[in-house]
Image: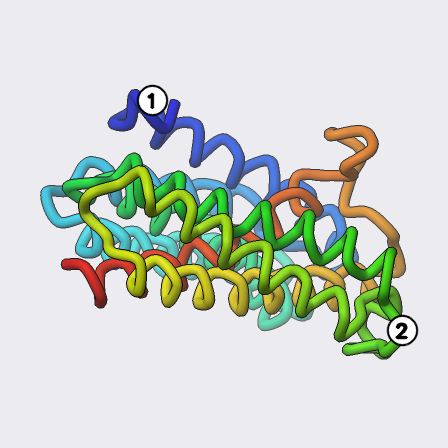
Amino acid sequence: MIWLGGPVFAVLAAAIALLGMNELYSLAAGYRPLRWAGHLGAVLIVLLAWSQENPERGILLGLGATLGLVAVAGLVLSRREEVILRVAVTLLGAVYLGFPFGVLVAARELPDGAGAVVTILAGTWAFDTASYLGGRAWGRRPIAPRTSPGKTVEGALCGLAGGVLAAWVAGLYMDWIDHVESLVVGIAICVAAYLGDLFESLLKRDAGVKDSGRLLLGHGGVLDRFDSLLFSSVAGYVAIVGLVY
């Protein structure tokens, strides 16, 4: 689907965003998010990123539309207790899921978009794998004990090495990015991926759950599988555009 790009990739991105939002809103069910507005807003962010000639303009239009939809959803409520919390959680879902996948679609729309997306995915998932394996083998010093006690400094360093290496190797097969640029993009991806992982752990800890869902069986839910990508897609896109384009 990355190779096909266009509407196929955009629909895939929107579908994953919706699945992730459903899990997030379930975690935050006690705050009663305005689900229809959040879901519709996220879809608009992703699809407008594809349909507009300038994807960044499409994302901005989608964010503006989302704000309007959430405002309408709040105004039509018959009972408005805790409406600030309800609106805030709704917007969190749309921005947390819709915006990154909209950016990933924008990355695919770059002149060398398929390669850009592959680089982001390779760096992110290599980071996830290497940090897990490194932490299991050598992890001793917790890096964020209050948020995710299992994550260690050693695991983070292994992840950084593995993710940067993966981005660099991916760049060897692409003529639009040089070695130094690949390394810088890899570093940006890994740092953001770790932040994304920790942020989702923060949300799950607040909700009192181990996994965001069961859709992906041993991998947990969609949020558990794509949490790092939600941040690394944005960092990777900014790094690639800033360095290459």
Q: Residue furthest left?
A: 53
User: Residue beneath label 2, please?
Assistant: 140
Q: Is residue 210 above or below residue 22?
A: below
Tell me which numbered mark, 2 or 1, is placed earlier along the sequence.
Answer: 1
x, y percentage for residue 207? 82, 60
x, y percentage for residue 192? 52, 66
Q: Secondary structure at mark 1?
A: helix
Q: Residue at x 59, y 62 (%)?
A: 161
Q: Secondary structure at mark 2?
A: loop
Q: Residue at x 31, y 64 (%)?
A: 180
Left or right, residue 137 beside residue 189: right
Residue 8: mark: 1
Q: Residue at x 66, y 39 (%)?
A: 222
Q: Type of residue at label 2?
A: Arg
Left or right, residue 92 beside residue 214: left
Residue 194 falls in image quadrant: bottom right
Is 129 in front, or is 61?
129
Cα distance in 3D space between marks 2 and 1: 44 Å
Which quarter shows the N terminus? top left
